[in-house]
């Protein structure tokens, strides 16, 4: 028989950890032991540098400890046990995203897979996505054996070039999957118009974009559905986790049915499904972390605006533009382009090295996804060759050439989201470090 864990013992443990962390990095909020290792591991997995972010992530205190303890002692740890936290989080997240429905999932990838599964997407279908994204966007599509079709990026905003989407649509296109990269919105006016004109549903990959808004309305419900990630590096995190938002009652039911082996009442089975459920523990964490997300938002907004005003003055530094209509970014990444010709030909790699030495770690961001070994391997994947034909697959990678994105990948520089939780003087030091590098070359 399990014995309930007492709040007093747990809080004492959290307080000790917090004290150790505060001494180590003088952050105002508690952090986890071993965090730097896991954050680093995560950065490397995402193609970032191994430099450590200054502000420790994730942040927690006794509220998270209490939330976890409450779930533990309830004995209701999963969705099927009838706990309260999943319902509470889903209601709170739906309200924050101004969505009628929210379904929590085990990750952002499984949120995307749930929506594609609920749409009945499968072999022979095509799904449009941008190349400037995390590989998981691509994986979500190939897990349905659909064909990912890349549409090139817009150099200034880093988002999908919405003016090129129409040309990529064929009779096989079954979904548009724009990504709100960095947490800023893709051009939803143009994308919605294309989706409507071709009668193709739009699933927003908003994995990096909670709180981003288009014309004042949070992203995630501008098409049929939106997908969010609560993986460890995200601004809203439970270590792993995800969510689908939608305003469509029928689609919400189909997603619910697809993400759990038991299906859902009134939903006709399509013969496919999965277990992509989030746990009550993660939901409990997310309830508290959602409050933090809202508390952090203004600081991120202010720091991002200030940093942009400083960086814009430096020749050769081009902060990613917010597309007219993007009224708020979620600021998961702060992205800019580096023009080496304005820095005496100093390569981006050398620029990043000097920046790191100046105490300003930054990352080169994504490499060209459509040229990666992982994506190229699809061309010879035996299932894809059988489904789409050897000839089609042979040319598939070439058809997906994205020259603007290739250029973007050569010029991009990122700061991760924790930077924007720093002080105003951190923003000044960052701009000064870049200006000094320029002066010295
Ligand atoms: C743009 C984008 N799409 C999809 C995902 C997948 O989310 P997850 O890692 O939670 O599966 C991520 C997360 O890293 C992402 O950044």
Image: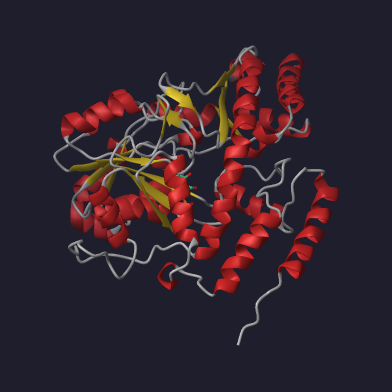
**Residue at x-position 47% and y-position 41%:** 96
Q: Closer to the camera, 123 or 229?
A: 229
User: Percent x, y for residue 230?
Assistant: 51, 50
| Coloring applied to the structure | secondary structure
Q: Closer to the camera, 35 or 245?
A: 245
Residue 63 placement: quadrant: bottom right
- Compared to residue 390, the image places residue 1 above or below, namely below
| Image position of 252 (left or right of 136) | left
In which quadrant of the rendered image does the C terminus lie? top right
Q: Closer to the camera, 75 or 306?
A: 75
**Residue at x-position 31% and y-position 24%:** 189
User: Percent x, y for residue 9?
Assistant: 76, 70
In which quadrant of the rendered image does the N terminus lie? bottom right
- Compared to residue 213, the image places residue 44 above or below, namely below
Residue 281 placement: quadrant: bottom right
| Image position of 380 (left or right of 51) | left
Q: Closer to the camera, 349 or 269?
A: 269
- Compared to residue 264, the image places residue 43 above or below, namely above
User: Percent x, y for residue 13?
Assistant: 77, 65
Counting the numbered discs, the total is 0
**Is residue 372 something one can see in this rendering?**
no
**Residue at x-position 61% and y-position 64%:** 68
- Compared to residue 360, the image places residue 82 above or below, namely below
**Is residue 72 something one can see in this rendering?**
yes
| Image position of 259 (left or right of 55) | left
User: Percent x, y for residue 88?
Assistant: 48, 55
> Which residue in the rendered view is the most extreme toward the bottom?
1
> Which residue in the rendered view is the most extreme toward the right?
23
């Amino acid at each position: 028989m399990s014995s309930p864990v007492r709040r007093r013992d747990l809080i004492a443990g959290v307080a000790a950890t917090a004290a150790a962390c505060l001494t180590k990095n003088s952050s105002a909020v508690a952090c986890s032991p071993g965090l730097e290792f896991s954050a680093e591991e995560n950065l490397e997995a995402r193609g970032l540098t191994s430099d450590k972010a200054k502000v420790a992530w994730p942040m927690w205190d006794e509220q998270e400890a209490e939330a976890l303890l409450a779930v533990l002692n309830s004995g209701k740890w999963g969705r099927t046990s009838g706990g309260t936290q999943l319902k509470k989080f889903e209601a709170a997240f739906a309200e924050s995203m101004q969505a009628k429905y929210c379904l929590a999932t085990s990750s952002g990838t499984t949120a995307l897979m749930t929506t594609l599964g609920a749409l009945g997407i499968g072999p022979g279908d095509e799904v449009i996505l941008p190349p400037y994204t995390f590989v998981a966007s691509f994986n979500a599509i190939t897990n349905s054996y659909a064909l990912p079709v890349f549409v090139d990026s817009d150099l200034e905003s880093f988002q999908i070039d919405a003016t090129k989407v129409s040309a990529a649509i064929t009779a096989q296109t079954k979904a548009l999957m724009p990504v709100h990269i960095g947490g800023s919105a893709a051009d939803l006016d143009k994308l919605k118009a294309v989706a409507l004109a071709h009668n193709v549903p739009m699933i927003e990959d908003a994995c990096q974009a909670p709180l981003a808004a288009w014309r004042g309305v949070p992203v995630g419900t501008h098409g049929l559905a939106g997908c969010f990630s609560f993986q460890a590096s995200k601004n809203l995190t439970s270590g792993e986790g995800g969510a689908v938002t939608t305003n469509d009652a029928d689609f919400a039911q189909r997603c619910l049915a697809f993400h759990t082996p038991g299906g859902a009442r009134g939903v006709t089975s399509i013969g496919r499904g999965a277990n992509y459920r989030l746990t009550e523990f993660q939901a409990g964490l997310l309830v508290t972390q959602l409050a933090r997300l809202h508390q952090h938002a203004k600081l991120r907004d202010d720091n991002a605006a200030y940093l942009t005003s400083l960086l814009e003055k430096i020749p050769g530094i081009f902060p990613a533009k917010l597309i007219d209509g993007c009224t708020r970014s979620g600021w998961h990444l702060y992205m800019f382009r580096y023009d080496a010709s304005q820095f005496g030909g100093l390569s981006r790699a050398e620029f990043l090295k000097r920046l790191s030495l100046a105490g300003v770690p930054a990352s080169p961001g994504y490499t060209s996804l459509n040229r990666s070994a992982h994506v190229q391997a699809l061309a010879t994947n035996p299932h894809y060759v059988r489904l789409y034909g050897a000839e089609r697959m042979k040319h598939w990678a070439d058809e997906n050439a994205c020259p603007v994105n290739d250029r973007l990948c050569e010029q991009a520089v990122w700061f991760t989201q924790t930077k924007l939780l720093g002080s105003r003087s951190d923003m000044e030091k960052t701009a000064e470090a870049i200006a000094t590098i320029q002066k010295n070359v």
